[in-house]
Amino acid sequence: MSDFARIPLLLGWREAVGLRDTYGGVDGVVALQAQHLKPAVPSDTIVIFMHPMGIMHYLPLPGALAAAGVHVLTTVSRYPNNDNALIMEKVAIDLGKWFEYCRNRLGYTKVVLGGWSGGGSLALFYQAEAEDPRVTATPAGDPPDLVAAKLPPADGVMLLAAHVSRAHTLTEWLDPSVIDEADPTRRDPAWNLYDPACAQPPYSADFLAAFRARQLARSRRIDAWVDATLAALKRREGDHAERAFIVHGTMADPRWLDPAVDPNDRVPGRCYLGDPRLINDSPGGLGRFTTLRSWLSQWSHDRSHADGIACGPRISVPVLVIGNSADDACTPSHTNRLYDCVAQVDRQLHVVEGATHYYAFQPDKLAEATQAVQNWLVVRGFS
């Protein structure tokens, strides 16, 4: 292991002023933070990590890679630790700015995307729009235009303990027992996993199919309400009108209660945030607070552009997929779907047996994942 410097960076630019979706700062100015984890041994390759809203500076893997001699940039989007109004298309713009910085300011000739967790689908979305741009507006019809942005492409993509998309993940976790979005107490006990009146594990194939269909139907009902509400607001208040709302019941996935559903080595009755029964309606649940535009951009199953499975077939660079066999956030079906969706490229799959999502208190698992990344980088010519 080698020493590395941790260098804080700040990147800023001006954008046309439109709808305000972040708090604080100078209106029309985007300011982003990052940390350059720079080993003493020089390299022409850097790995960029970005999560749509997470701050990755001190997560285990980036630091372990830097200590092993890999040059790393941990970047933060304009939505640090707050995805209430997050727009995935703007996150792609932010990531592109760091690509330009690495090549033009830091002097790296090769850039590899490190898509950790929610950063995996972001990496595929970004790379697809860099290689084969198609998105000219957000699902709500707002800027940015990613075709006009001319995003610089990566030289390789790593999907590390990743899920297929924020939208598909939330849909798989939505509580289909919610009857009234405005009144979370009104629920159908027959579809409430945490009600004794609901079927109990092990779940039948018929129950699971009906449960998944009801989750998707709920997502589409929210879509319809969002469309109607946004249209009415724009007619009354103008193009920049917006509204925030709450999505109740977002941790009701049968796999957390039945280990036979998408089986791996996770602990039954738990998810990566704790007890799913409590997380289902807690303030810290996925997608709890959102806006009309943000719902369409990051959470809508049918409307979000940032669908890793749809974007994967559009890329042409080498891909590494790492799954963790005890992951209680991104389970094997996500790992396998990601691997399958990039069948057209040079791809590799590595599963770290017994590893949890964050490698918490698992230094041997972290070391294995680090070595897998190192080996892949070397074999693919990323020095």
Image (cartoon, grey):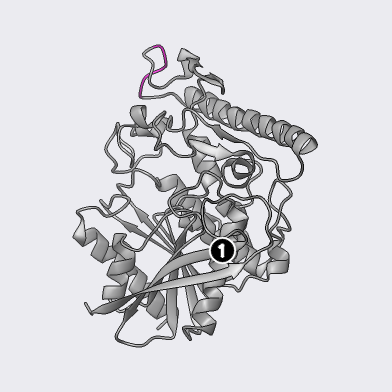
Q: Is residue 334 left or right of residue 220?
A: left
Q: Residue at x 37, y 32 (%)?
A: 279
Q: Residue at x 28, y 78 (%)?
A: 4
Residue 32, given in percent of the width and then of the height, sits at 49, 65
In this view of the protein, can residue 378 be seen by the observer?
A: yes
Q: Residue at x 64, y 62 (%)?
A: 314
In this view of the protein, can residue 318 be seen by the observer?
A: no
Task: Judge the density around disc 1: few (<14), some (14-19), many (≥20) Cα neighbours within 10 Å.
Answer: some
The residue carrying mark 1 is: 30
Mark 1: amino acid? Val
Taking 283 as reference, is 104 above or below it?
below
Residue found at the very far front of the displayed protein: 26
Residue 174, given in percent of the width and then of the height, sits at 50, 31
Residue 151, given in percent of the width and then of the height, sits at 63, 70
Q: Is residue 241 left or right of residue 152?
A: right
Q: Nearer the viewer, residue 34 or 170?
A: 34
Q: Residue 308, located in which quarter of the rendered image?
A: bottom right
Residue found at the very far top of the displayed protein: 197
Q: Secondary structure at mark 1?
A: strand
Q: Main SS of the magenta segment?
A: loop
Q: Quadrant of the N terminus?
A: bottom left
Q: Which residues are magenta?
A: 197-201
Taking 311 as reference, is 248 above or below it?
above
Q: Nearer the viewer, residue 27 or 182?
A: 27
Is residue 200 within the magenta segment?
yes
Q: Residue 198, located in which quarter of the rendered image?
A: top left
Is residue 293 within the magenta segment?
no
Q: Nearer the viewer, residue 183 or 22?
A: 22
Q: Quadrant of the C terminus?
A: bottom left
Q: Nearer the viewer, residue 150 or 354?
A: 150
Q: Residue 45, located in which quarter of the rendered image?
A: bottom left
Residue 364, given in percent of the width and then of the height, sits at 20, 61
